Image: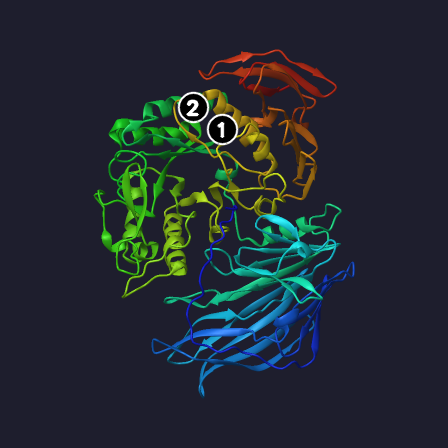
Amino acid sequence: MTSLMWIMVPAALAICSVASASAGGRATLENTHLKVEVDARRPLVRSYELIESGVKMQGTVGEADSAGVFCADTYRSGQPVQVDIRPLSSGGDATSRHYDYAGFHGSDKAFTFTLRMSLRDSALHIQLGDIREHPGFELREIRFSKYRPLSLSAGPHAVLAIDNDLKRIGSLEPQTWSHQPFALLADSGVSAGVWCNQIDPGGPLEVTVTDTGSTKAASVGPLVFRHRVKDRVMPDFEMRIGILGDYNGDGEADWLDAANWIGAQIPAAMPDFYTRSHVYKAFMCDNNNVRFSIDQMRERMVQLHNLTNGSPHIIYLVGWQYDGHDSEYPAMDRVNEAIGGRDKLLALMRDGAKYNFNISFHFNFDDAYITSPDWDPSVIAVDDKGDLVKGGVWSGNQCYIISPYKLVKSGKAARMVDRLVELYPLRDTIHLDVLSAVPNRVSLDKDDPSDEIANLVLGKFEIMRLFKNAGLDVSSEWITYPFVGPMTDYWHAGFARPGNYPINTAILHGRVLYGGWYSGWQGAEANYIAEYLAYGATMDMDLVYASPLETLLDVEFLLDSVEMMYNRRPMTGFIRRGSVVRVDYGRGTWVEWNEHTGAYEVHVDGRLVAKDYACMVPSSNGAYIVYSRDARTVSFPLPDALKGSALKVLELTAHGDRKAAPYELRDGELSIDAAAHSPYLVVPVPD
């Protein structure tokens, strides 16, 4: 599995015919960045040219040249009907062109629409909109038939990003990858990125490699424009094709420029309370087996407040309800007595603010149990036989899969959100397990079936909206394509392994936050901190009371506090030489890591901030913290904020005592004889 779970989704059934039109000359669109040659009468792209460099890229090639473009899924009085899509007119100006179409059922006009191509900076925007449905007709969706407005022929340097890796087009066998989240092609001096706004469980694009015997090429196009999801009319279709030179300004025109451009198209805005906080889960209880009591959580909260100089934390409590982890969903009324009960939980949540801790919940809107006081079979998904759909067996109990569409339509989702915020003092965020990890829920009810898109648009996205209206942002589990943008914090994501190019990281870093693929803190990988830093991942811990405090501090300082310094920046460079990986994040910020030895260093804005399991990171009120995993002398260049100031160094303790510690300052470098797992607060002393 890659970090953006690819899911194969069968096409919907439809009765339709394909629109086509004869060629009628060429038209040229041009601005200061880009020149694009298109057909005058058909919405086919012939070529792209970067004005500054003169480097070109191909548009439509091969069999798509003679193919039709559209296939419509149309209903009349609730029944599917065959529709012929015919061109009406076309026209444009120097930077845009429009193509007008109508759908006919026999002699009756069913609908009209317009496809527009326009240049904006270094990108071609393709939009399909201005839809007018005639009385009695309903346009559900338009499928694109072999519409490939971007192509690249095989060559020595021609590459295609696929399966979270970069592959030479010439080395690939002819094949098609459907439901891709994004697309990226690159050649010498130019790269191209493709982004599309369509909602799809796996992704809205199709990538094809063809071989005619004389020419092998990769091409990219959209799959489907969904105009309606049940009764909801969706936003107009938009696909953007960026043709890039040195987009990120690093002095090279390569695949990273397209990756950064794709990331910039993602409509995501990470809240500060994620980017500035240590975020993890506290696993409280499972089947009444207490792993972390509320009293113990309070103890850890105070300790971490003291040891981190009051750094902000978000802690999602797992297993706080009923008998613990996953028990009795979707019920929420009873707090697990084994961990301490309701009064202690509410006091912990209220007191968290005093320590800069946000104590929130891990909950679930996907799973339900027959034993739950809130069991409601009417919101459970059903299969083609009408049977309730079963999920996994968690904590010894069989769970059933909720249809998000039915949960929202019934009003129960709204009541659940209202009840949660009524019962508990939640603020800013809540973690919904599974929500993003499984985007393709289906319920085959005879009277009102709901496919993957209905369960996303009218289900899961509506659940997120309900929480947003209640003042809570939703984080979740795995990154999957349709949630990238609406959701910005994820527990897990896959990133590059040795031998691969980190395509997903290059697209997503700086746009969303994500934990790692595995829980290295449990000892799964000796090098996990260095690897997480290189690929921009954050903590993905499920803390229990038995988790050593020292291990937690390693993660908080060596991983989280360092990555916070560049978690809003895109990846701008990537080099692998043997076992050494270097990842750049712009403006003198980079991570270099030896995959074999585990040695690493991190520079931010030109200053060394971490090296081989020691770091010097910002803290509150202009102070810094120096930390080392091992007992040794550690040295770091002074940050500009501390230069010219008298300093004092205090060793922080779990109990809140602050002991003065000796240090040496020579040639702008601070050295401390650090004890293992002990943070040292470096404070400027006012004149």
Q: Which mark is residue 521?
A: 1
Residue holding disc 2: 547
User: Is the C-beta separation of discs 1 and 2 under 8 Å?
Assistant: yes
Residue 219 horizontal side relative to residue 81, left or right: right
| Mark 2 crowdedness (10 Å alpha carbons): few <14, some 14-19, many ≥20 | few
Residue 262, position in %: x, y? Answer: 60, 53
Label 1, residues with CA under 10 Å away: few <14, some 14-19, many ≥20? many
Q: Please tell me whether residue 561 is drawn above or below residue 136 in the rendered image.
A: above
Is residue 202 shown to the viewer in this render? yes
Q: Amino acid at mark 2?
A: Ser
Q: Earlier in the sequence, mark 1 or mark 2?
A: 1
Q: Amino acid at mark 1?
A: Trp
Q: Quick one: which residue is furthest to the bottom in this view? A: 107
Q: Position of residue 310 (x, y in %)?
A: 48, 26
Residue located at (36% from left, 28% from top):
351
Residue 441, x across and y down, in percent = 37, 55
Q: Is residue 89 above or below residue 582?
A: below
Label 2 sits on a secondary structure element that is: loop
Image height of 285 relative to 211, above or below: above
Q: Residue at x 41, y 60 (%)?
A: 453
